[in-house]
Amino acid sequence: MQNPLLQQIDAIAKEKGVEPEIIITAVQDALEAAARKKYKGEELKARFNPETGDFDLVTVKKIVAEVTDPATQFALSEAQKLYGDERKSTWKSSSPRTRESWAASRRRPPSR
């Protein structure tokens, strides 16, 4: 059975006469634009997982020997723990933003 989101993407693509990848790219762009408004100063990328039909929002950080800006940098020692010794300080790392953190950031406090 196909994921409901994939079904909708396919239906919209057929209706508009475009490839599903066009719709997926548009959704990724929209997610990134919304995330940039919320998480200013962070490099964010939306990725589509065709196997699950989910979109993931990830923070992209430069791997450095010494972190001076945690919003944009990730420690080389931590990257090597996660990815192995082949990680170099010139590479970038991406870490997912969980749905819970994304949803929690969108919630507003109750009005009084």
Image (tube, grey):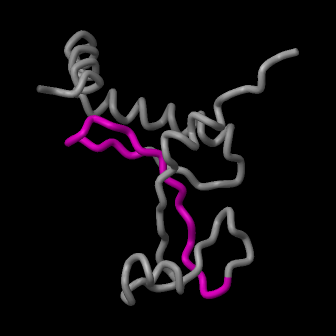
Residues in magenta, as a range: 47-66
Direction from residue 48 to residue 65 in the image, left or right:
right
**Residue 11 within the magenta-colored segment of the rendering:** no
Could you say which quadrant of the image residue 16 lies in? top left
Residue 60's place in the image compared with 35, above or below, is below
Residue 84's place in the image compared with 103, above or below, is below
**Residue at horizontal 57 percent and vertical 34 percent from the top:** 103
Across and down, in percent, residue 48 comes to: 33, 42
Direction from residue 72 to residue 59 in the image, left or right:
left
**Residue at horizontal 38 percent and vertical 46 percent from the top:** 47
**Residue at horizontal 24 percent and vertical 10 percent from the top:** 15
Across and down, in percent, residue 107 comes to: 67, 28
Which quarter of the rendered picture does the C terminus lie within? top right
Residue 17's place in the image compared with 73, above or below, is above
**Residue at horizontal 47 percent and vertical 62 percent from the top:** 94
**Residue 65 within the magenta-colored segment of the rendering:** yes
Across and down, in percent, residue 28 comes to: 43, 37
Which quarter of the rendered picture does the N terminus lie within? top left
Tally of numbered discs: 0
Q: Nearer the viewer, residue 111 or 87?
A: 111
Across and down, in percent, residue 106 comes to: 64, 31
Q: Nearer the viewer, residue 34 or 102?
A: 102
Residue 96's place in the image compared with 21, above or below, is below
Task: Give the residue furthest to the top.
Answer: 15
Direction from residue 5 to residue 73 in the image, left or right:
right
Task: Give the residue furthest to the right.
Answer: 112
Direction from residue 46 to residue 1 in the image, left or right:
left
Q: Main secondary structure of the magenta part?
A: strand
